[in-house]
Image (cartoon, rainbow, N blue to C red):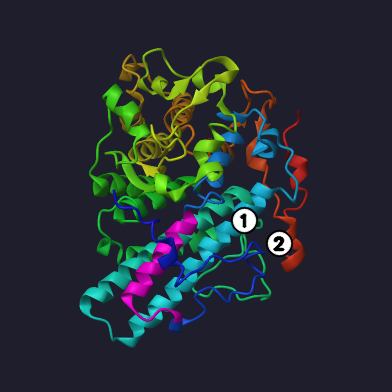
Amino acid sequence: MKNYFKSIAIAYLSIALVSCDNFLTYEPSDSVEDATAISTATDVENALNGVYYTLGKSEFYGRNVVALGDIAADNCWMLGTSGHFSSIYEYTVTTEDAELSDTWTCGYQVIDRSARLIKAGEALLAEGNLTDSDTEIVKGALSQAHAVKALAHFSMVNIFALPYSQENKSTLGLVNVDKESYEAFQEVKRGTVEDTYNQILADIQSAKANIDLVADDYFRFNAAALSALEARVKLYMSDWKGAITAAQEAIQKRNGALEMNADKYASMWFSIAVTSEDIFTISKTADDNLSANSLNTLYGSYDGKATSGLQALFAENDMRNALFAGKGEQLRALKFDGLPDSKATSNIPVFRLPEMYLILAEANAQLGSTQEAIDNLFAVAQRNPDLKKEDIPTAKAELLKFISVERRRELFQEGHRWYDLRRTGEHMTRVGGNVAVIDWDASKFVYPIPTDEVNASGLAQNENWFNNLPKK
């Protein structure tokens, strides 16, 4: 398996790690400041490796963004022995929460580095001195940088802003970054949620220009992954037709298959080989020496558990039961249980084929295309061999509820549940764990902007964010 995060030192010749200071106020002396920092196609490739490395750091998609999606919701919980993610699970977060601050900072590092790479790469192309093969390399890299930037904006806006809706789209979103990154001490302000989504869609559109130049490598943003991102974004925007078109494209371009052999399904989670279901996954190897910073450690020695309420959703013969160990409140979910000889090592799926089928199911159900929705849903739900297609409800409300539950069954631990609750308005009642949340509307809650950012750059805080914390 080719690992794009191995050559970190080389990657940082073009884009180096910044200090822990806030992104919007750090002095960017070690970043790509102008086109002179990148002068060859090899420089562009090395810089792109740095972008992917930053995306996969534990502070962002390598742990925090994914873990929040389950631990803040009702799929997983923290026993509290390590302190990690306890405030997220218990809803005792403050404006100085370390995990939120790290996510904000690293997310903007991803965005910043992507934008600087795009600017420098476009300048290199404009010079007109590259060979045809090097031109294709640079164009493919820029498409990937646009896609990663879109994913980072999307991940951030769904943590630090209200979910997209007609009601919320004029509320505060992110400090959006287009082609020009922000310099140290530059005055910045937040756009609206709609502005941020427009930036995401613009980056997706820019990425489409040359994404076909990217090989079918599932550790990089290729054409199938870009369509998968567009499908997820449009689902969150309730653009049902757009979500259907993009999800169908992702399935077609990936040309993979859902694994319906129980033994093979279980074993694919304990390997770092690409599976037939992977569309885009963040590569990890034992050489990364992740240790305490891995998602695996959070769900391992840091005592992250699965809720009994999650396990109760699975029928007796559902093949996904193999991904649980223990029982009651000591139940462990095993998607990130690691390799036999490296327990901290698991690839982190960003997009998989089952999500695309579930997007099709939900969007078709919303449009009243009931039979299409049931067919799409059953493609995944038949992981329970006892389920018959005629068992699936046909009434719209009941069908959408079934799809919501199936998303929990299929995508647990992959960081979807909390974001799903916010975008759909479904109320959450935790079953299991040791901190109760009852009939809570997560769609009205938004995490605060970190204090350091507000103090340093004067960004507007999410006003009265604490008023919508769950009542305990």
Image position, residue 340 (x, y; %): 38, 32
Report the Cα–Cα distance between label 2 and label 1: 9 Å
State left or right for residue 280 relative to residue 294: left
Query: Which stretch did the figure color magenta?
Result: 37-55
Image position, residue 139 (x, y; %): 31, 71
State left or right for residue 257 relative to residue 204: left
- Which amino acid does the dot numbered 1 rest on? Trp
Q: Is residue 352 above or below residue 461?
A: above
Q: Is residue 19 above or below residue 272?
A: below
Mark yes or no: residue 393 visible.
no
Mark yes or no: residue 329 visible.
yes
Q: Is residue 264 above or below residue 468?
A: above
User: What element does badge 2 sit on?
Assistant: helix
Nearest the viewer among 93 and 178 is 93
- Which amino acid does the dot numbered 2 rest on? Glu
State the residue position of label 1.
Answer: 104
Nearest the viewer among 279 and 77 is 77
Q: Are marks 2 and 1 in contact (CB under 8 Å)?
A: yes
State the residue position of label 2.
Answer: 453
> Which secondary structure type mostly characterizes the magenta part of the structure?
helix
User: What element does badge 1 sit on?
Assistant: helix
Image position, residue 392 (x, y; %): 38, 20
Residue 50 location, quadrant = bottom left
- Say few, some or many: other residues with alpha carbon within 10 Å of mark 1 (under 14 / 14 to 19 / 20 or more): many
Q: Can you say which quadrant of the picture contains the C terminus?
A: top right
Q: Is residue 18 one of those drawn in magenta?
A: no
First-in-chain label (2 vs 1): 1
State left or right for residue 340 relative to residue 12: left
